Image: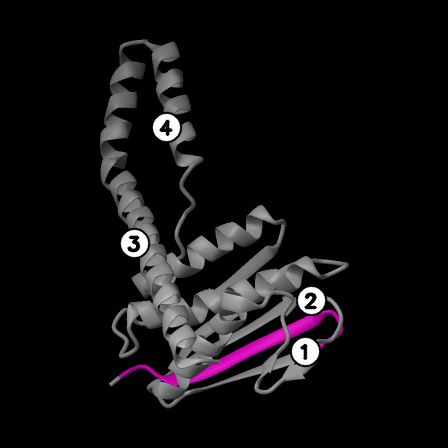
Amino acid sequence: MRKKTYLKLVEYQTEQSEKHLNEVRSIHKEMRGYKHDFHHHLQTLKGQLEAGEVDRALAYIEQLDHQLMNVDTLLKTGNVSLDAILSAKIAQAKAENIAVTVKANVPDALTISDLELSIIIGNLLDNAIEACRMATGERFIRIFISIKGTMLYFSMLNSAGTKRKKAGSLFATHKGGVHGFGLRRAEAILEEHGGWVKYNSEDGAFTSEFLVPAIE
């Protein structure tokens, strides 16, 4: 890959990741707003019901329900940025009828930046969602994230189609260009921080795993 093309791809994905982070931070801020307003909503409903205005109270509840339908509940891993990244990707997966389970416990302060975390996790989940589209049976993604000493550990199992052929350290994807480049960027970031990433492909399943220093 020519240096000029490489730099353009890096710039493109950095811009996309920053845009994505801003979007999910906005969702998180909106969710905090709903939590803050919850007491006020209860007080309003209580007043309407005490005044015997049942129809008005029901209309108020209907309005609240409609607003909440447009906001997915964020995960609570302990890391706000990770919550936002995972929530956005899980919503995308669920929209494609992919069952997602997450078990994660991560501190908020990490040495790896929010942007780097977004690029790594986002690209791995994009790869998992793509693989699920090729699955003939159950579609699922199972994620485990934790801290081991000073290291951030990530493990993911997802459904897939037929076994993929390995191309260098990565496996061939059904999409080229920026998508394939994204996995290489994730691998490069992990290596820059002294970490590693491993993949394994079998018929019907694909696993991704990484370990990287993340706590001082």
Q: Amino acid at mark 4?
A: Leu
Helix, strand or loop for disc 3: helix
Viewer-nearest residue: 120 or 148: 120
Spatial CA span between label 4 and label 1: 45 Å
**Residue 35: x %, y % from top left:** 28, 42
Q: Amino acid at mark 3?
A: Asn
Q: Earlier in the sequence, mark 2 or mark 4?
A: 4
Residues at discs 2 and 1 in contact (Cβ within 8 Å): yes
Q: Is residue 208 magenta?
A: yes
Disc 3 target residue: 22
Position of 113 relative to 212 (above/below): above
The Cα–Cα distance between marks 2 and 1, rounded to whole angstroms, is 8 Å
Q: Amino acid at mark 1?
A: Ser
The mark lying in front, picked from 4 and 1, is: 1
Marks counted in the figure total 4
SS assignment at label 4: helix
Residue identifier under label 2: 160
Residue pictured at 31% horizontal, 50% vertical: 28
Give the percent coordinates (x, y) of residue 11.
Answer: 34, 68
Q: Is residue 188 above or below residue 140?
A: below
The residue that label 4 is drawn on is 64
* Residue contact at pointers 1 and 3, CB within 8 angstroms: no
- On the image, the x and y values in percent for residue 129 come to 58, 60
Rendered image quadrant of residue 159 = bottom right
Q: Residue shown at 25%/73% (left/top)? A: 109
Q: Which mark is residue 100?
A: none
